[in-house]
Image (spheres, helix red, strand yellow):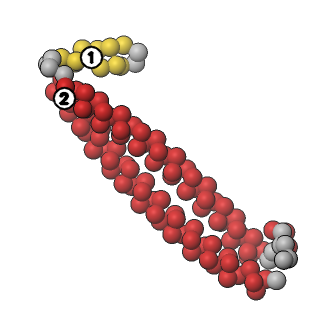
Amino acid sequence: MLEVTVMELPPQIQAQLMQLQQLQQQLQMILMQKQSVETELKESKKALEELEKCSSDEVYKLVGGLFVKRNKDEIKKELEEKVETLELRVKTLEKQEEKLQSRLKELQEKIQRMIPTAQ
C-alpha cells in the first residue's frame, strides 16, 4: 500500500484537508459547549425539583459567595426561565452539531473521491 504524506498531495486536496480539520475542531467546541449547557440544565432542573419539596415560602439563594433570603416563588420563576433558556441553547447546539456532522461527512467523501485521482 502506498503511503501519501500531506506534502505530496496537490494543493487542492491539502486545502480540503485543512478545512476538514477546522470543521472537526468546530465540532469539538460545539460538543464541549453542549456538554456544559446540558450539565447546567440538569443542575437547574434538580434545583427546581428540590425547591418544589420545600415547604417554606422563603429560601436562600447563593449570590457571589453570600446566601440571600428570597421569596420561593421568585426563585422558582427564575429557575424555570433559566431551564427554558438552557433547553433552547441545547437545541441550538444540537442543530449546529448536526450541520457540522453533515458537512464533515460530505467533505470526507469529497476528499476520498479526490485522492485516487491525485496518485
Q: Can residue 71 be seen in this view?
A: no
Residue at 29% in and 40% down: 83
Q: Which dot, 1 or 2, sits closer to the camera?
A: 2
* Disc 2 secondary structure class: helix
Q: In which quarter of the image is residue 16?
A: bottom right
Q: Position of residue 108 (x, y in %)?
A: 63, 72
Residue 14, image x and y in percent? 75, 70
**Residue identified by numbered label 2:** 52
Residue 78: where, in percent of width, then height? Answer: 25, 32
The residue drawn where x is 60% and y is 61% is: 23
Q: In this view, does 102 lie to the left or right of 92?
A: right
What amino acid type is highlighted by mark number 1? Tyr
Of marks 1 and 2, which one's residue comes earlier in the chain? 2
Which corner quadrant of the image does residue 106 belong to?
bottom right
Q: How far apart are marks 1 and 2 (CA)?
A: 14 Å
Residue at 24% from the left image edge and 32% from the top image edge: 49
- The C terminus lies in quadrant: bottom right
Instruction: Say which of 55 and 72 sits in front.
Output: 55
For residue 60, which numbered disc appears in the image? 1
Q: What element carries label 1?
A: strand
For image coordinates 36% across by 34% down, the residue present is 43
**For the N terminus, which image quadrant?**
bottom right
Badge 1, how many Cα within 10 Å: few under 14, some, many 20+? few
Q: Is residue 79 visible?
A: yes
Is the residue marked by circle 2 packed among few (<14), some (14-19), or many (20+) residues within 10 Å?
few
2, 101: nearer the viewer:
2
Vertical comparison of 77 with 115: above or below = above
As drawn, is 12 to the left or to the right of 99? right
Vertical position of residue 82 compared to residue 34: above or below: above
In the rendering, at what x and y percent does residue 29 appear? 55, 50
Residue 97 vertical placement versus 88 (above, below): below
